[in-house]
Amino acid sequence: MRNNNYYKTTILCLFIFLFSAPSLAKKDLDLLPIPYQIEGTTQLQDNTSYEKDYPHLNTYVIIDLGKTKNPNKAPKKMTLIGTKSSVTATLYTIKKNCSYLCGYNKEQEKNEGEECHHVGLYQITKSLKTLGDPLVAIPGKHRIKGLDNLQKKFLKRRFSPPKETPEVYWKPIWPPTPDDQTKRYALTPTELLTMYPNRRRTRIPLNKCEYQLHHRLGALTCKNIALFTDGRKALAVSYPDYNAATARMLSAFEIDKLTYYIIQLGLKAQSPVGLMVHTNDGWKLLIRPKDYALLC
């Protein structure tokens, strides 16, 4: 009788594990959605305020929704993360912003190069002094834990990978290019090596680079190149292209036992803010570059 109860209990536990394991694995892979860029902040008078001399002002964060054909599908709620804290913001209204990138044509007497995108005004109940400088907007409502401002932790010191680091070339996760056109990178204790497939290597001494480190992620800034690294391989690389080469860690926070890094990566004519996170499948980059023209 005792053995029968033992086997029944064992089978029941195995049954529960088999059916719960897929859900646990799925939860581990559920990453945050790709964040949106913040363009700025503004204050508007509350329509319900009747005090003319001291009107109540609501605070709004301007979020870039991109060149979308369906702006009404924008997230109704956003989690805004600042340098000091986070807050949930609610969509108030959507506006269309247009600019002329190519200036005024005197011969044809008209502006040229019109480019438009939508922005969302999201209302926040927390003051900007409490939030700090807004960094990034994540669709949905999320509980942010352990927010750590990394901008004051830029360490100007020599970068030294482990001495046993072999000269192995890695393909970064950014930029996304075909294998036969992708530069590969190797880190040694003294140099950053870059190489196109079947071409000569370029050597960059590391003793003149600046390095920002937080646990397992580092940001390396050298002359004419900046990149994120885990200490042995390049993860995301930035070159000057109508913009400075930029790889900066801004903040870090935790959700579902995963550490997310708020990062800024220099791309062509822009430096969007995104997220980097390490999962069981390696490093992931969650970034939303502007999808409309910035240059004439």
Image (cartoon, rainbow, N blue to C red):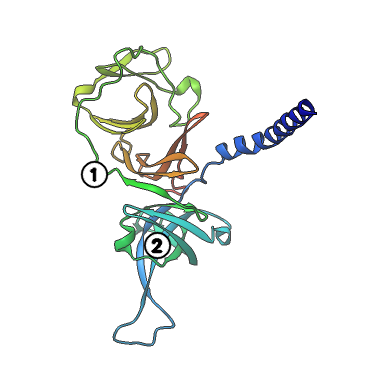
Residue 76: % across, % down: 54, 61
Label 2 near label 1: C-beta < 8 Å?
no
* Closer to the eye: label 1 or 2: 1
Residue 294 seen in the figure: no
Q: Does residue 98 appear in the picture of this structure?
A: yes
Q: Amino acid at mark 1?
A: Lys
Instruction: Residue at 56%, 41% (x, y): give it.
Output: 30
Q: Is residue 147 left or right of residue 89?
A: left
In the image, what residue type sits under mark 2?
A: Val
**In this figure, which residue is indicated by the disc labeled 1?**
152
Residue 87, image quadrant: bottom left
Q: Relative to 226, is 33 above or below?
A: below
Depicted 127 relative to depicted 154: above or below: below
CA distance for labels 1 and 2: 24 Å
41 and 66: which one is in front? Answer: 41
The picture places residue 202, in percent across and down from the top left corner, at 30, 17
Question: Residue at point 41% right, 61% down?
Answer: 62
Could you say whether the residue bearing mark 2 is in a helix, strand or loop? strand
Residue 18 drawn at (x, y percent): 70, 32
Neighbour class for label 2 at 10 Å: few (<14), some, many (≥20)?
Answer: many
The residue labelled by disc 2 is 61
Which is nearer the eye, 177 or 167? 167
**Which corner quadrant holds the N terminus?**
top right
In the rendered structure, the answer to whether residue 34 lies left or right of residue 124 reads right
Q: Nearer the viewer, residue 29 or 200?
A: 29
Q: Residue at x 52, y 55 (%)?
A: 140
Identify the image quadrant of residue 49: bottom left
Residue 150 placement (x, y as % from top left): 29, 43
Front residue of this view, candidates 151 and 85: 85
Most distant residue in the front direction: 1
